[in-house]
Amino acid sequence: MATHPYIPNSVPEVRDAMLRAVGAASTEEFFADIPAALRMQGPLAIPAPHLSEARLKRHVDGLLRKNTHCASQLSFLGGGCYQHHVPAVCDEVNGRSEFATAYAGEPYDDHGRFQALFEYCSMMGELLEMDVVNVPVYDGMQAAATTVRMAGRHTGRRRVVVAGHINPDKLAVMQNYGRADLDFVLAPFDRASGLLDMAALAGLLDRDTAALYVDIPSFLGTIDDGAALAAAAHAVGALLVVGVDPVSLGVLAPPASYGADIVCGDIQPLGIHMNYGGGQGGFIASHDDPAIVMQYPSRLFGVVPTSVPGEYGFGDVAYSRTSFDKRENGNEFVGTAAALWGITAGVFLALMGPQGMVELATGIVQRTAYAKQRLARIPGVRVTHEGSCHFREFVVNFEGTGLPVAAINAALLKQGVFGGHDLSTDFPALGQSALYAFSEVHTQEDIDQLCATLEKVIGQ
């Protein structure tokens, strides 16, 4: 491999010193234990290096200019990552050096980080009406995967029934996490209403079922009857695990109120920018049931008295259950927590308060309802689950236009609009359909512009 200015170990003298230190004569000898079929036979396809910082900066700036982002385009994409207004104080606090630079919440000096995370967990607990909330994991998809594994360990069962209107990417993560000790079965949803088929679900739940997992609102934006789902799961001794958009709790009852045993989701809507695949953080919540609490693999922060009378400190709870303590015998590997995003979400929740969350969610419901009415008036366009309630997102069918979603989205993009998430591959039963998302950043004029642009591209 040629010497590369930004890969220190590519310097021959450095590489040779490393090989000497481990007693290997060559790189090939060092990797001898790895079967040849699993090793890359040839050099990495790394471009030639830019030999000055100025040239490298110009190259990177050129790459960035190719990107089209939602600050410059009108966007109606969603599906798990959402465009919201981020208050300036969220960026101000999460950019502070005592928070931004500490790895996984473990600075040498605390600087209030543990207390900030404790306050975040407390506010999330209030929003969710749950007693225990974890320090955030990587994202909501990992949180969902972890919750069903928790249910499997708690019940001693393998079978997990998953609502069929789940985000396919989330399902893939859940299957990947649980493939060694869980079996996944999809429960069908009704194409007309977008709600779970309760009769079919009843036939899938049995005494081998560890958990019923459902998102409320669903990936398609519909809102199932949580109390009926809880009753069905509990009738066979299974746990009800609910994935939830935390913003929706400004208008929807929290899952704990209708019988959910474990709740999870993503905190990205809580003051965190869409971030090129980042900016996600997964929360898990439950009641203070020791049998379930001990199944958490992630960190839990609490407040405890110190050795000084009247003084308290913030830190880990039930540390012995984590992989930090048990290593390979832990419930799961803890890994790097998304602690910075937890602090950011805490700032957002403190700023909004209960009334602010109600106003935020109410505004989204109003925009969603208006968008459903406006889009339904476009010739050839149909709101698929028009009779159902929706939060933030809903399915729009374009079969009547004679055009595939991909072509419509390409035409919209030329007009400066990101169309809805194409569902035609992941949900073929819905035909040429797209998932459109709305938030408080969309004005009535934005929605009218979307409809006018759609009419234009469909009529061409």
Image: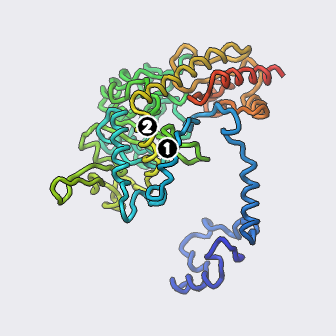
Q: In which quarter of the image is the C terminus?
A: top right
| Residue at the (62%, 25%) spot, across then down | 443
Rendered position, 107 above or below 6: above
Amino acid beneath label 2: Leu
Answer with left or right where residue 88 lies relative to residue 153.
right
Along the polypeptide, which appears first: circle 1 or circle 2?
1
> Which residue is tagged 1?
89
Q: How many labels does the image show?
A: 2
Q: Residue 351 carries which label?
A: 2
**Which residue sits at x=64%, y=30%?**
76
| Cα distance in 3D space between marks 1 and 2 | 9 Å
Q: Which mark, by number, is residue 6? A: none
Q: What element carries label 1?
A: helix
Residue closer to the observer: 281 or 23: 281
Question: Quick check: 336 above or below 47?
Answer: above
Q: Are marks 1 and 2 in contact (CB under 8 Å)?
A: yes
Mark 2: which secondary structure? helix
> Looking at the image, can residue 323 be seen?
yes
Give the quarter of the image for residue 377: top right
Tell me where residue 185 appears, x and y as whole percent: 46, 34
Quadrant of the image containing the N terminus? bottom right
Residues 21 and 314: in front is 314
**Residue 43 place in picture, x, y as percent:** 70, 70
Q: Which residue is drawn at 17% across and 60% down?
A: 307
